[in-house]
Amino acid sequence: MELKPATRARGQQLGWSPELLTRIEASPVNDRTVANIALMKIPAERVASFLDLAERDERMAAVTFNFMRTRSERGVRAVPGPNGLGTPEINIGTYGEVPDVWPYENDTPLGSHPDQSNYAPGLYHIYNKYEVWAPGVDELYEEAIRERWVPATDLDWQNGLSELPEEVERAVCQLATLYSSHGLAEQKIISKWFEAISYGFHDVKLFLGTQVYDAGHKVEALRKRALANGGGLGQSPLGTLYRGWYGALKFTELVTALDLVYKSYEVTLFEAHRDFAKSDVEAKMFSLMAQDSRRHLEYGKRHTLWYLQHAPRGPQNMQFWLGRAEATLSVELRHSHTEKESLVVLFADGLEKVSAGVEQLRKLRQKQAADYIGLLDGLGIDRLPMLNPGLSMLGENPLAM
């Protein structure tokens, strides 16, 4: 075998002696294998060791080292940051450049290149970055990992609960039932979209995986609360809220309904539960769930801004999706007797002060609407003139239908 001039030149640049080059040409290995060894910058003494092996074992002639033939960037050295070697630290060079349109239909990871001889298109159908992206989504993923918690051990089920009046215990358990159902729906609907999102947007998929896990926390912790203090599960929710989630025809529509509209209301709701908690378990549980929900809301905010700035008809689509999401949330809040009556009893701390509970619920609904409008104002969306009338009404009469 005679080495090609380019292969011989690479070997000479690496300090391979004329004797070694002559031995290579007399060996069982082919030019392609030698060229790949040269690309790896293998020194002469190690090349000689490989030739010893190849001369003893003819099977080595089939080894090509073709994995070296890639267009991926080499020589990258990621440096750990203050929280270790996180995903932001490895999103460097070409490995951090996410294109506006992902060019591959298969499972090619960001920064790598497909083998054109083995290219099987997948089921993905989201290839545009504006449909899923949020700046800093890798940071949100890392934050979710650092803030993970375990309902079984991070909550003091042994000593953190106290006996409650029957109606208050039942109200707490009814609310736990409703919110855990919301978590189940959240898990299912987000998981449904994983297969649609192209592999190149892996940072988004990683973060969404943490939201599914967070929703699992919500389901687990709330069911445990319902079963740990003599209450039990209550009635199921109306489910109108979920129609806006399951009915989303675009991923951004789902994010609008779930991670923007609903999460805004949920954060304020869970913070109120924390403040009115009847036990240490409930106070910590709702504090941790609010922490998770704020992170989901942050993704919703960042994605909305990106979508508004990069998507065709971004502002027009967003106003339409906000209207649909507000409508389903409004129906759920106004017609769910189990939720509003349970909240009244919880806030009143019993039947004797129900009127005070109604007033506190009015303040909650008013704050939820104000927080939501303030959130959209910060995104450059003037939603107040178009806010769903039902949501506005609840700020005046929280028991309105």
Image: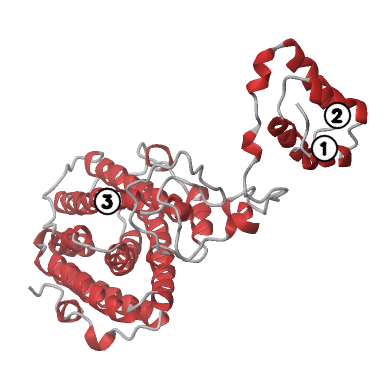
Horizontal placement of 85 versus 21: left or right? left
Say which amino acid is labelled 1: Arg
Task: Please state which of the two labelled residues, at mark 2 or mark 3, is closer to the viewer.
Answer: 2
Q: Which mark is residue 8?
A: 1
Which residue is farthest top?
56
Quick check: can you spot residue 117? yes
Instruction: Check whether the beta carbons of the residues at disc 1 and disc 2 lie within 8 A of each other.
Output: yes
As drawn, 60 above or below 35: above
Distance from disc 1 to disc 2, alpha carbons, whole Å, reads: 7 Å
Say which amino acid is labelled 3: Gly
Q: Residue at 86%, 29% (x, y): give it.
A: 21
Say whether disc 1 or disc 2 marks the residue closer to the N-terminus. 1
Q: Residue at 28%, 63% (x, y): give it.
A: 254
Residue 186 is situated, as x and y percent measured from the top left of the image, at 27, 53
Distance from disc 2 to disc 3, alpha carbons, whole Å, reads: 66 Å
Say whether disc 1 or disc 3 marks the residue closer to the N-terminus. 1
Q: Which mark is residue 190?
A: none
The residue under label 3 is 183
As drawn, 151 above or below 239: above
The residue under label 2 is 21
Residue 143 is situated, as x and y percent measured from the top left of the image, at 51, 54
Q: Residue at 92%, 31% (x, y): give it.
A: 17
Residue 136 is situated, as x and y percent measured from the top left of the image, at 52, 63
**What is the quadrant of residue 93 in the picture?**
bottom right
